[in-house]
Amino acid sequence: MLTPDLIEDFRRDGAVRVRGAFTPDEVALVERGIERNLAEPSERALVASRDDDAGRFVEDFCNWQRIPEYEQFVRSSQAASIAGQLMGTGQVRLYHDHMLVKEPGTRQRTPWHQDQPYYNIAGSQTCSLWMPVDPVSRESTLEFVAGSHLGPWLMPRTFMDSQARWFPEGSLQDLPDIEADRDAFPIVGWELEPGDGVFFHMLALHAAGGVGGDRRRRAFSVRFMGDDVVHAPRAWRTSPEFPGLTEQLPEGAGMETPLFPVLWNNPG
């Protein structure tokens, strides 16, 4: 499934599409989990679209311990193995899961951002999976600025009103206005079918469009950590938040708690 060229593409660009990474049964398993999640949202669930949006964008986080379909997929699929090979790490731990559903007619774009600045971790061996259970057009898919995972860290802001709540204003470089001059950036993205997986570094700049017509865009994301990832407590609320973790893990400690189980060890 993974060729040396694909691994090289990931390390150069920070994002790759793996065609047919998951079986129809695995896609159906995740689809059942998403529908259970929508019917039984957690306290972390949020609507990420505006009230006047014709559609609806719903997200939820950290549900693998209460939604058995998610846990089964995370533990039994090839997702962690693929992530481990792409990262070049000896061991892969789960960081968290993330459900993202855009209903038909959702105009809300997901703005350009990096994920890691919102988190409470440090390290370079990171990888996220984004897998759809519905066909995804090129206009609605995730897209990336190739090579942006190599840095620098850019200012994380709230998606709805662009407020700097995670780092003090001016302490990190601001994102460039990518949409104002898309041709100036090496943007990559792919039309996707159920079973495909997009794997990307947590510092890769990415964004996504809305969903037109009558098509839903249900997706499930899993974040993975490699050998060099350690706890980086923040003085602010991270997204997602892990209450009480600072009492368990000091700064710089490995993420060695049952909350972040080991999913894969390199057989070599």
Image: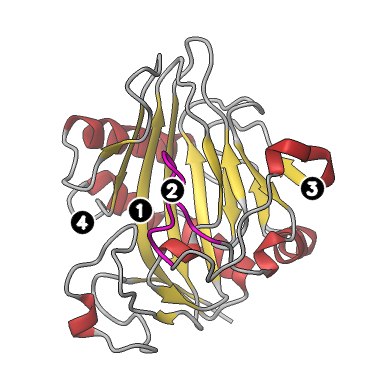
Asked if labels 2 and 1 touch by Cβ distance under 8 angstroms, the answer is: yes
Query: In the current view of this chain or complex, which residue is farthest to the top?
Result: 214
What is the C-alpha distance between the residues marked 4 and 2?
15 Å
Q: Nearer the viewer, mark 4 or mark 2?
A: 2
- Range drawn in magenta: 155-167
Q: Nearer the viewer, mark 2 or mark 3?
A: 3
Q: Nearer the viewer, mark 1 or mark 3?
A: 3
Mark 2, residue position: 221
Q: Nearer the viewer, mark 1 or mark 4?
A: 1
Q: Nearer the viewer, mark 4 or mark 3?
A: 3
Mark 4, residue position: 65
In this picture, is 82 found above or below 104?
below
Q: Secondary structure at mark 4?
A: loop
Mark 1, residue position: 97
Mark 3, residue position: 185
Q: Specify whether 258 is left or right of 82.
A: left
Q: Residue at x 75, y 44 (%)?
A: 187
Asked if labels 3 and 4 touch by Cβ distance under 8 angstroms, the answer is: no
